[in-house]
Amino acid sequence: MNAIATPSAAQAQLDIAEEFAFFGDWTERYQYLIDLGKQLPTFPEASKTEEHRVHGCQSMVWLVPSGDAAKMHFEAISDSAIVSGLIALVLRVYSDRSAQEIVATEPEFIATIGLAKHLSPTRSNGLAAMLAKLKGYAAQTLA
């Protein structure tokens, strides 16, 4: 595989699991999530619109799709440090993939790294809402 090739969604999930296995406890894992969120690209203020807002999240989250069924790209940001880290993980798995791969890929990394047990109910709901919106955009391009 060359340096510019993007791994599959399945490989991205395995990579995430390996990274999180490195950390001994959830304090370190939360810090890693926060650090990942800080690495998100700058998000244009003009895209922080109601149309792009993900409802169901306690914090403010915006998700902007682009591309077509062959390759969809997503940009997203949150006003919460931990949620921004969750966004970074979601984008690694789902952005720059075909709409078909996006729709077919279940977010197994959430259970694999134990995230489901360590998120508050509101964050879990927000993560589910973000995934539903992202997959909904992909499904629309296939329709």
Image (cartoon, helix red, strand yellow):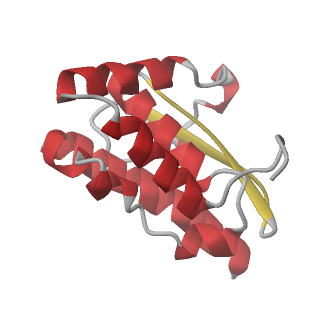
Viewer-closest of 24 and 67: 24
Q: Left or right of 37: which side holds 143?
A: right
Q: Left or right of 10: which side holds 28?
A: left
| Occupied quadrant, residue 43 | top right
Q: Measured from the top left, where is residue 109 in percent x and y?
A: 38, 54
Q: Left or right of 16: which side holds 24?
A: left
Q: Measured from the top left, where is residue 89 in percent x and y?
A: 48, 41
| Occupied quadrant, residue 84 | top left
Q: Residue at x 58, y 30 (%)?
A: 48
Q: Residue at x 31, y 46 (%)?
A: 126
Q: Measured from the top left, where is residue 35 in percent x and y?
A: 44, 18
| Occupied quadrant, residue 119 | top left
Q: Residue at x 34, y 48 (%)?
A: 127
Q: Can residue 88 be seen from the camera position used here?
A: yes
Q: Measured from the top left, where is residue 76 in percent x and y?
A: 57, 36
Viewer-closest of 31 and 141: 31
Viewer-closest of 65 and 48: 65
The quarter of the image holding the C terminus is bottom right
Q: Left or right of 86: which side holds 65?
A: right
Q: Residue at x 54, y 67 (%)?
A: 136
Above or below residue 76? Residue 125 is: below
Above or below residue 31? Residue 140 is: below
Above or below residue 133? Residue 75 is: above
Tag count: 0
Q: Can residue 140 be seen from the camera position used here?
A: no
Extreme-bottom residue of the structure: 143
